[in-house]
Image (cartoon, rainbow, N blue to C red):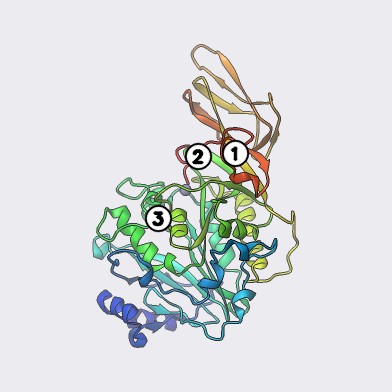
Amino acid sequence: MQLGISSFAEETSTTSEEITADINNESTEKVKVAPNLNLKDVAPAPEPVTVKPKEKFNNETVIEPKDKKEIIDENPESQSKEDDYPTASAVKEKPEREKLVILGAEVPPGTSTRLAWSPEVSISGLALPTPVLVINGAKPGPTLCLTGAIHGDELNGIEVVRRVMYDISPDELNGIIIGIPIVNLQGFQRGSRYLSDRRDLNRYFPGEANGSLASRIANSLFTEVISHCNYLIDIHTGSLRRTNLPQIRANMNNPNIAKFVQGFDKIAVVHHSGNPGMLRTAANNAGIISVTMELGESLRIQENQIDAGTHSVNSLLDKFEMYPRVFIWGEPKPAYYQSTWIRVESGGILFSKMGLGDKVSIGDVLGSVTDPITNQSTDLESPIKGYIIGMAINQVVMPGFAAFHIGIESNQEDMTKTEEDAPVPTTSNGELDSE
Ligand SMILES: [Zn+2]
């Protein structure tokens, strides 16, 4: 294995121009075959393949899998059957498979490898290559991408990507899985949500080649990696000292996305159409079916949250026939929620009386806020019936702080109704609990 890696490193020491030219020309002569590495083995970090940012993301530059058309079908009539999720069997009939060439390397079917993506945005001698794990299954099927730590302080997703990917045998996989455990290496190394220029990377997708640092990184990631995906699960945690019950956030107004989330087992699904600049919004706009997975809180490794996220991704792989396992199913379907935030009315120290997943009724005390100077304590009562799907951890809060995210049980059809029809006014959580 050592030999494989070092020879690959030597072979890929071409200039970035050459590699870019190769990809664009589809003349694969200079595209090297990536070494077949068992991802379960311990191995040195991969050598980076630096790829120049493209002028602008557009579909022509995307290496589009042939099966994409069959997966993303805009005709709602063909989506009418209850169990009609786009499974791997739907694309198994394809006689030919397109070569998987990613980050300047060809990954043959039935192999897995570690590559590295390096956006040209730093002092070149100090470039920080970002590892990208790729498993190209022996059999054809869709391409699923998993991204973690777009916010550098959101750690649970990093371990979910590792657990999912290191448990896959390429021989038994239908399709391709591409995993980037730590997208925002700059933030990760500083324990920060943000890039080194204090921008939030998840507000700059799909990015621009000539834009700000964040915009260039977004553009490079989107063009070089995300454009290969049919499906994307972008894994996050709560931000600003809030924690989330394991949940999928998805734009349920899009019938393809609504079908996709049916593949997740035992997880809450919250409708949120997504804000401009988010990876999932940009990916959806480019025809990639994408959702955000929220797991717990930032700056922590939480095993129960990681277990839940891993289980949920594995259930999806099973249901979509990408990686069938003998699965012990829990709840057969995801649970759908509309949601609203409960804000505190007075400032002070917040102590919660509820935990994630707790059921609440109207009038239940969710927590209390105590003014440390006047000693006045105010209870925070739930105005609605539902479940705690997200909450602030105990901290000092100011009036107006969104402390509890309550999910109201719903069904797939009702959850995208207009706000007037919703059982309670729902709030956009974009500013409150940012993905
Ligand atoms: Zn996040």
Do tag 2 and tag 1 residues touch (Cβ < 8 Å)?
yes
Q: Position of residue 169 (x, y in %)?
A: 60, 76
Q: Earlier in the sequence, mark 1 or mark 3?
A: 3
Q: Residue at x 59, y 76 (%)?
A: 91
24, 241: nearer the viewer: 24
> Residue 323 occupies which quadrant of the picture?
bottom right
* Label 3 environment density (alpha carbons within 10 Å; few <14, some 14–19, many ≥20): many
Of labels 2 and 3, earlier in sequence is 3
Element at badge 2?
A: loop
Q: Which amino acid, by three-letter code, is at mark 2?
A: Asn
Tell me where residue 325 appears, x and y as whole percent: 70, 70
- What amino acid is at disc 1? Ser
Crowd class of label 1 (few under 14; some 14 to 19; many from 20; radius 10 Å): many
- The residue labelled by disc 1 is 339
Q: In this rendered view, identify the residue nearer to me: 52 or 276.
A: 276
Which residue is painted at 51% across and 19% down in the image?
A: 346
Q: Nearer the viewer, mark 1 or mark 3?
A: 1
- Furthest toward the top, the residue is 374
Q: Amino acid at mark 3?
A: Asn
Residue 172 lies left or right of residue 20; in this view the side is right
Q: Which residue is mark 2?
A: 429
Q: Which residue in the rendered view is the most extreme toward the bottom?
A: 29
Secondary structure type for disc 3: loop
Q: Toward the viewer: 287 or 13?
A: 287
First along the sequence among labels 2 and 1: 1
Give residue 62's quadrant in the image.
bottom left
For residue 389, above or below residue 76:
above
Q: Residue at x 65, y 50 (%)?
A: 412
| Tally of marks | 3
- Mark identifier at residue 60: none
Q: What residue is shown with label 3?
A: 184
